[in-house]
Image: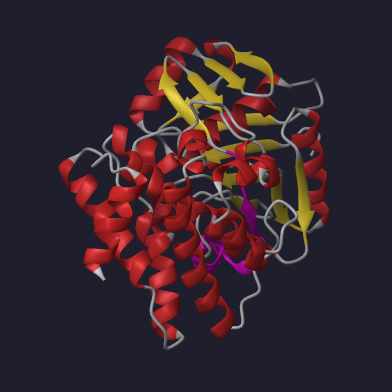
Amino acid sequence: MAGDTLAIFGAGAIGCYVGGMLQADITPDGANVRFIARERVVSDLSEHGLRLSRFDGPDARVAPHDIAISTDPATVAGCQMILVCVKSQDTKAAAAQIARHISPGCLVISLQNGVDNARVLSDVLGAENVCAGMVPFNVVGSGGGQYHRGTAGRLLMDDTPRTRSFAAALTSCGIDASVHSDMQAVQWGKLLLNLNNALNVLSDVPLVQQLSDRAYRLVLAAMMKEALAAMEKSGIRPAAIENVRPSVVPHILRLPNWLFARVARAMLSMDAKARSSMWDDLQKHRKPEIDYLNGAVVRLAQNAGTDAPINRSIVALVEDAFSKGQSPQLSGGQLREKLQRMR
């Protein structure tokens, strides 16, 4: 990793945080980081630099003059590693842009939500050049170069010699990272957790408050139950969630509030104001990744000959919220009633 040049392709909240932490930790033998982002982000970082904070650790800063940032995809030329952080719906277009400028031997790592992005990148860039990754933590940008990490978790990647070295570099700069031998299982396990992103859009309350409400948790448990049934029929075995077997999580979510708070303490280990990335997309009038999360469950169920009516209804409610540009701000009880009527 020493002396490598690394590109963040699609530097939004996750990309700015990961790239910024690497840049803040720069040493004479460290990685050089290049950011490829939309014009809005380029202008913001060029003026303010990066101010990175987290709910459980120290802050970091990168001055504007220390940030190499551009809107030009050709910026990836000459890089030894590219971290793809675009939204899932933009992966195919990103792969085509990267393909025009990628250098031989460059490793491309997907740090995106969903389960198919590494495959989409591999179809264009070659499987030998692409690794899957999973980012468990949430980051929200508030403008002025400020990005706040609100939740915990370990970043995981496919197990290769180069990703082992990169995981060590990430860990040394304050991002706990490791490798895993079955990233498909990891990504399906992460997707189960990401089903909660849609609830955060529909509730419009912080994640801690939402998870502390049993009515919301009952909806999440029902979505997970549908997803687990579809996975089982499809021969998919999702990885453990916070060291808990996925099949057990819906039962934990259904516990009374007082017992849930004790049993699932790790799930509530986050900033009191933390929100989901999909909620952030709604505030910034971006398209949601709902089709790659709850929508993926609906398609998996259909292909397996079963059904996922709750996830299908959640997709419709989220799409309606985005079309109106605002959350319906449903309480847990209101959401359960609405879902019952939609079935």
> Hey, which residue is sitting farthest left in the picture?
324
Q: Which of the two residues, 6 or 220, is positioned nearer the viewer here?
A: 220
Q: Nearer the viewer, residue 279 or 20?
A: 279
Q: Is residue 111 visible?
A: yes
Assess whether residue 13 is covered by the magenta stretch.
no
Q: Say if 315 sits above or below 144 in the image.
A: below
Q: What coloring was used for the rendering?
A: secondary structure
Determine the residue positioned at 59% across, 67% down: 126
Question: Vertically, is 49 above or below 39?
Answer: above
Q: Over which residues does the magenta segment extend?
A: 117-137
The C terminus - image quarter: bottom left
Please report the residue visible at 55 percent of the width from the left and 76 percent of the height from the top: 231
> x, y (%) of residue 167?
77, 43
Say which quadrant the N terminus sits in: top right
Image vertical order of residue 176 relative to residue 217, above or below: above
Coordinates of residue 187 in the picture (x, y in percent) = 60, 61
**Residue occupying image coordinates x 71% and y 51%:** 242
Asked whether residue 118 is drawn in magenta, I would say yes
Q: Is residue 136 visible?
A: no
Q: How many marks?
A: 0
Horizontal arrangement in the rendering, residue 125 relative to residue 205 (left or right): right
